[in-house]
Image (spheres, rainbow, N blue to C red):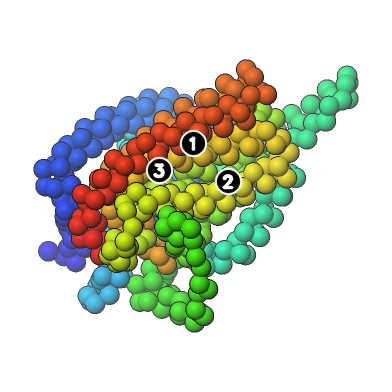
Amino acid sequence: MSPFRSLLAAHGQGTWNRSARELGRQGAWVLALVVGIFAALGALGLLLGGGALGWLLGSRLDRPVVVSILSGLLAFLSFGGGLIGGVLGGARELAWEAYRGFPLRLRTLYLAELTAGLADMLPLTLALALTGLLLGIGAAAPRTLLLLPVVLLETLLMLLALQLLVGGLASALVRRLRLALIGLAILAWMGSTLMSPGLPKRGGGQARTLQAAQVERIQALGRGAARVLEALPTHAAARSLAQVREGRWGAALASHLYPLGLLALVMVLGARIMARETSGSAAAAPTPRGPDRLWSFRHPAEGLGRLHFLTLMRSHLGRFAFLMPLLTVVLLKGPFAQFRANPLWTVPAAFAYLSLVANNFVFNQFGLDRHGVKGLLLLPVGSEDLLKGKLLGLAAHQGLQALMLALLLRALDHAGPAPLLGGILLMGCIFLAQTSVGQWTSTWAPRPMAMDSLKNNNLPFALGLLSMGTSAAWAGLFGGAYALLAWAVPRLLVPGMALLFGLVLTAHLLLLPAAAAALDRRREKLVEALG
């Protein structure tokens, strides 16, 4: 067996062994069956939807606007998917440190990492959508069939290679978090200045003049976006399909020199980062620290909460989470700037989006403890206090992010105090509901998390699906309550959300003894998986 196949086989076998150890062999087979059924249904929907869209575009490839639309879709699937996957930390699949003692070539390790990354949820979903899109184009324009595999490979490889590259750069960015925060604050301010419509309340013809000027500015932005799309390699790939449809094979093949050249550059940069990380030279030398100050607490849960909060703040992923409020504001002031004037959905959407950051920690609350979980479970503390301590630490971590987002929305978006306070309470409701689920999954499928890296910190596929489903459910439930109160009785927004928060907190505390009992039953599994 070649080294490449050995790496993939070891990765697949290791993933199956972890599932069998955590769930039992029968539970792992049941989980695989359920996930397989849902994945097949989702894949069918993506293929059919992408195929229908591809058919519409493929039958009109002679129109320049259709080429631009196809270019934008390919750019979203490759560049957008790579950036999102890299920032969210889902780029690293293989345990590189475990392979340092083996005589593996960098090329083999890099290609194995790319292939293993395709099994992650985001790349797999985008790959299915891309396949359906290209199949639809091929059905509508049969002359393009011979060139479609080239476009498919270019787009998928750019997605995976950019995901690896951004994941490595994100790790370096966390080490310079202070500079990153300052830089993103400047970007948010520039975005608010440049993208804000800024229509004052004036009457008559002056308002109409300003509206006409705004329409002209939007049209200018559209023309600028079209020029940006034409400069991307995906536009060359989309244009090559139109050229093949016209029978110009030479021009079509020449159009792929630019996408292939950029792909090669991204892969070389990603391989260089991988070489540095696998050799261990990128590991920062430990800095000497003085003894921590002594601290006391009135209740064991308070001490455990502070311990967990400090653990979160010392991890790269925990520090990286504080970039997300700024990124949320940049999204509101940039792509969604035209909807700024309607806080009925922008404020709750911002806080609901920010709540997604905690899912990795909430669904794996003992992951950062790693070997220390043995000492944690030996403390003379009950399981309920242990879970309460985890809850307090996570609440402090999420609360600081919510406060940061509220201040940014107040300063840059001029949101009122009542919507912001309601948004914080909305985020608190989602956090408590999600933490109640996470207390079960943390003992059901524990997984060690890296403190000094963003790689291998993503949730397993099954927990990722559960995380997305519960996040959507809580956001719809509590966000709907927020929107209903803000629309029907704005004066009762804060009292209503406070009442809802109290109800969710009561339900969380009532479910806590059952979660603690589950923790008592799974203590040995926790030590086996993490220690």
Q: Which mark is residue 36?
A: none
- Circle 2/circle 3 CB separation < 8 Å: no
- The reply to whether residue 179 is visible in this rendering is yes
Q: Residue at x 32, y 53 (%)?
A: 382
**Looking at the picture, does residue 432 appear above or below residue 165?**
above
**Count of labels in the image:** 3
Residue 369 x %, y %: 35, 62
**Whole-Å distance between the Cαs marked 1 and 2?**
12 Å
**Which secondary structure lies at badge 1?**
helix
Q: In which quarter of the image is the N terminus?
A: bottom left
Disc on res. 435: 3
Mark 1 highlights which residue? Answer: 429
Residue 336 visible? The answer is no
Image coordinates for residue 254, horizontal then vertical, percent? 45, 50
| CA distance for labels 2 and 3 | 16 Å
Q: Earlier in the sequence, mark 1 or mark 2?
A: 2
- What residue is drawn where x is 79% and y is 31%? 199
* Residue 221, quarter of picture: top right
